Amino acid sequence: MPTCRSASLLGLALAAPLGAQHSDPTPDGVAPGEVLVPSATPAPGFHYELRAQNALKILDLNGREVRTWGRPQPGWVFAELAKPLSYGSVLAIAVDPTTSGLGTHKKVVEVDWSGNLVWEFDPFLLGRKPHHDFQRLPNGNTIIVTDEITTIPYLGPEWVRDDVVMEVDVAGNVVWEWSSIAHMPQMPISAAGWASRRGGSPPYTFFHMNSVQVLPPNKWASVDPRFAPGNVMVSYRELNLVAIIDRASGDIVWYLHNQTVGQHHPRMIAQDLRGAGNILIFDNGGNAGAPRGPYRPFSRVIEINPVTGQTVWSYQCSSASSCRPEFFAPFTSGAQRLTNGNTLITDSQTGRIFEVDTAGAVIWERIQSGWVYRGYRFDLRWPSGPISFGW
């Protein structure tokens, strides 16, 4: 069984200290809050997602440090992603830096404001590894993207990576899971497309799931059951595919295919934000697909109406335009709709986190040293106040 350690969430709420005092005014037009910045330094021999974090930092809008976490526990370092939780905790992926390749050992950890490890889920004994994304749910469960090495008998004997979504409760019990391999026939990929994913050496990366979200309450759900709250949205970078899974049946009931290139971080926008019910996607560009399509040398952030499939808002800054700086992040990165209707964008490769208004003007930015997987803006009341779920 996987190992799991937990603590009372109520106890954390009662014991959490207040955060720093905030005296500086918010710049005009900028959404108020602070930013969680997991900055990284390349570690020799590590894949980009395993670059060891120098630290997790909370920064105010002027770049001053409000809080810093070092290691989640002795012998482990923070890996690619961290998210703020209510009452001062952060939920993150941690990695044993002595491991690499197929033997890489990762787990999901929760660290409180004081730096104490209060919860962890380690699926290592199940032969699985958490990667890329997770979400803490309102009921206290955690949904996690994991992978395992297996075979697909009808495609041949070669080893492949199966991306599996797992939901675990506070005690570490697996209460729901979903296998990509088991649902390949429902994906809009041809036999030739699957064959094209055999490049390189096994284990082949057929899927490369990089995002998961349990759908929030939304305006579409009352007329279209595909968007029922509780259904699960996932993103497959290598397939240029975003899909929604019916929680009860496990079927893929909606997808967006080849309208993005190597996309990351699709999120249905929450009810109280501009564009509520639409899907915000970081559309990386570069080269992806099954088979691979032409190389696109710029990134976009797009907002999709999921019923019509139409783009209703977008931001890009390419060499063909007069804007500066040019915007191209072919890997990782993300976007977040903010409380004032603006959009926070993370360009992972440059360490640039910036805010754009509805017209696409850059009104705030910070350039962080090192690789930034994804930054998050959150309410100034944190850690003494709640954080919205959905990240």
Image (tube, helix red, strand yellow):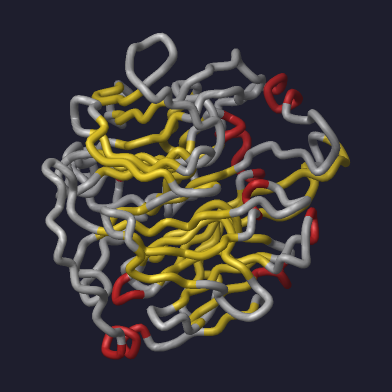
Residue 94 figure quarter = bottom right
Image height of 132 relative to 2, above or below: above
**Left/right of residue 224 with respect to residue 23 in the rendered view:** right
Tell me how many marks there are.
0
**Quarter of the image with the N terminus in it:** bottom right
Query: For the view shown, which residue lies furthest in the right direction?
Result: 157
Give the residue drawn at x 51%, y 65%. 55
Q: In this view, does 105 lie to the left or right of 38?
A: right
Residue 226 visible at all: no
Residue 279 seen anywhere in this rendered image of the structure: yes
Placement of 218 over or under 5, stated as above or below: above
Location of residue 95 by image quarter: bottom right
Is 224 left or right of 114, judged from the image as shown?
left
In front: 30, or 304? 30
Q: Residue at x 27, y 29 (%)?
A: 305
Q: Quadrant of the C terminus?
A: bottom left
Location of residue 15 (image quadrant): bottom left
Residue 229: give x, y in percent of width and height. Answer: 30, 52
For image coordinates 55% across by 26% down, the residue present is 188
The residue lying at 47 percent from left, 35 percent from top is 242
Relative image position of residue 354 (x, y in whole percent): 33, 40
- Give the image location of residue 311, x and y in percent: 30, 22
Toward the viewer: 183 or 117?
117
In percent of width and height, residue 373 lies at 50, 49
